[in-house]
Image: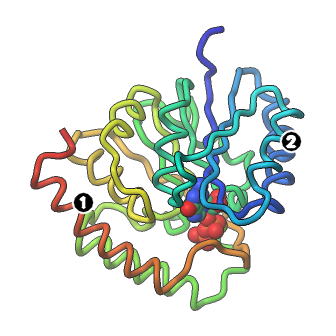
Amino acid sequence: MSNPFLSIVIPAHNEESRLPPSLAQIDGFLQKQPYDAEVIIVENGSRDRTHKVALDCAGEYPYLRVLQSPDNLRGKGLAVKQGMQAAQGDWRFICDADLSMRIDELVKFLPPASDGYDILIASREAPGALRVDEPEYRHIMGRVATYIIKAAAIGDYEDTQCGFKMFRGEVADDLFAVQRMNGIGFDVELLYIAKRRGYKVMEVPITWYYDTYSTMRLWDDSVKLLREIWEIRQNWRRGLYG
Ligand SMILES: Nc1nc2c(ncn2[C@@H]2O[C@H](COP(=O)(O)OP(=O)(O)O)[C@@H](O)[C@H]2O)c(=O)[nH]1
Ligand SMILES: [Mg+2]
């Protein structure tokens, strides 16, 4: 079989309840598209039945594969790397399991909208973006993270942390071969390397629906983000990104 046009990679951690409705919405969308697609769920570290639920869904949707990290180590960055390296699509999309961006907005990340770009990142801050039901304190936390990222790592974007990002296939092959951050810093790491490689990145404004359930821990993850940014800079200086 030839490569699919689109790969959707979903990192999943304790997602037994959000995964099935999200997969049903993705299926509804894909049924209406003229191209072939694959969906890859990468589960790790879950304490619930996410893996079993994902395997059951794979029985229902023939284009769905389920991967698990070795030793069931935790980490979104680890999961995304594994999924992106297994993916075969001409275009490869990272997609949070909660679908806090409606899946029909995916067309804004594909040709013809993506013509001339290598990476398209969903943005909750770009002109035209909309945030639905987000409490003010969460928005402020997000802005603080952005200022930290701008000051310490990469100044070009208003929102590097949104969980929806599209990569041209060859660009994904190049970037995920050197991506090292297992945790929350992986988005910053990818954009940091992409900038130094001269890839063209577009920020795509989306409508984002706040979901009260979150696998992220605001304080712990902010500290981790800072630590990982420091590591990214060290890695760059040591020439670890090729
Ligand atoms: N495989 C894997 N996925 C993770 C991990 N941490 C978060 N995720 C996934 O990353 C996505 C974003 O998490 P979410 O809780 O929606 O974060 P928020 O929207 O930033 O509050 C979801 O699909 C999670 O299941 C992890 O350690 N491993
Ligand atoms: Mg979310």
What residue do we see at 31% from left, 76% from top? 226
Q: Nearer the viewer, residue 97 or 70?
A: 70
Amino acid type of the residue tagged 1 in the rendering: Ile
Quadrant of the image occupied by residue 93: top right
Q: Residue at x 89, y 34 (%)?
A: 60
Q: Is mark 1 within 8 Å of ligand 1?
A: no
Residue 103: x, y in percent?
73, 48
Q: In the depicted view, which residue is nearer to us: 173 or 139?
A: 173
Residue nearer the viewer, 148 or 228: 228
- For residue 56, the mark is 2
* In the image, farthest residue toward the right: 60
Q: Position of residue 112 (x, y in %)?
A: 56, 30
Using the rendered view, name the quadrant where residue 111 is placed: top right
In this orientation, which residue lies closer to the viewer: 192 or 218? 218
The picture places residue 172, in percent across and down from the top left corner, at 42, 35
Q: CA distance from mark 2 to mark 1?
A: 38 Å
Q: Are marks 2 and 1 in contact (CB under 8 Å)?
A: no
Residue farthest to the bottom?
137
Q: Amino acid at mark 2?
A: Asp
The image shows residue 35, relative to residue 99, as above or below, that is above
Residue corresponding to mark 1: 232
User: Which residue corresponds to the image point at 34% horizontal and 36% vertical from the top-left?
Assistant: 177
Q: Position of residue 12 (x, y in %)?
A: 66, 55
Depth check, mark 2 against mark 1: the one in front is: 2
- Considering every residue shown, the one lying at the far front of the view is 71
The quadrant in which the N terminus is found is top right
